[in-house]
Amino acid sequence: MSNDDTTVQWMTLRISLPYEMADAVTNFCHEHGSGGVVMDEDRTDAATVTAYFPIDKWDMVYSQLNKYLSSLHEIFPHLLEPVLETSPLKKENWAILWQDSFHAMEIGDTLLVAPPWLELPHGERNLILIEPAEAFGTGTHETTQGCLVLLEQASMELKGLQDRFSLLDVGCGSGILAIAGVKLGASDVRAVDNDPVAVNSALKNLVLNRLENAVKLECCSLRDLAGPADVVTANLDPLTLLANRDKLLELSRRYLIVSGVPLDQWEQVRGLLIAGKTALKTEIIRAEWACGLFESTR
């Protein structure tokens, strides 16, 4: 294949689908070699996933994707079938189009999340630079945004009560919550994930923010963790949250922030956490997703 910049070297895939399928399809695209994935949820009942694939992988990916979407539709027969659109993308347009997909986002009262290529004026907000990559947590998804808002709240309350506080981010993905923790004043920050790809992505973002020496980063499972933290963040799927409830409660000395829970499963997750001797302090509902800040009552 020619290396001429006018040669088609990428395919753009745009999928309109019910929001219940969006996370699964996004993960599929990441796992099958996408050069970048963007998920937009402009409505509560639908989402658009846009992904970019190298042309040499396209035929195989497209075939596997159709089979995967068919299997999803069998699981969710009551939902509308996804609609696919494809178009070629020349190499010369790739960087511009990909970078234009990401913008700076003000989150909470003090945080600003942005990709590294944006030139931003120095302001009063804490700037978090995140390179969009394979790992979850660029700040665009409601679950990540909710976690950041609740982490900001917990940090402000702890700083009013004690000189120092610690943070443990379980399932760190891109490392965005650990970075935010340092920016918000945490003095002892750990970030863990059982996925080496996520850990590598988190390390790159720590370096990007010049915080590689401020966060202890580990690739390990949740059950192997020891030692409590004042705040534990867990942006995980409901099954993982429930299966590891006791471990998460054991690790959280004061606050536990959970997210990644679809609204229709939130009541169950919330109830089991409260039954574990915690009190729900704040909950955030955004676009059919729920997250909560729980305070230990032990």
Image (cartoon, helix red, strand yellow):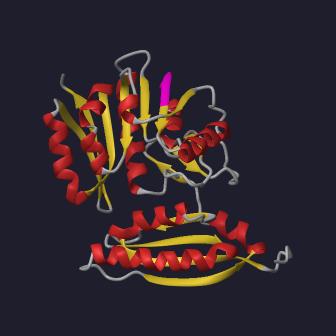
Residue 58 visible in this rendered orientation of the protein: yes
Q: Which residues are magenta?
A: 185-190
Q: Quadrant of residue 41?
A: bottom left
Q: Answer whether residue 189 is magenta in the image.
A: yes
Q: Determine whether 292 is above or below 288 in the image.
A: above
* Left or right: 20, with 182 as reference point: left
Residue 5's spot in the image, x, y percent? 83, 75
Q: Answer whether residue 169 is magenta in the image.
A: no
Residue 253 visible in this rendered orientation of the protein: no
* Residue positioned most to the top: 163
Q: Residue at x 55, y 28 (%)?
A: 215
Q: Quadrant of residue 53?
A: bottom right
Q: Determine whether 163 is above or below 100 in the image.
A: above
Q: Determine whether 32 is above or below 166 in the image.
A: below
Quadrant including the N terminus: bottom right
Q: Residue at x 66, y 37 (%)?
A: 207
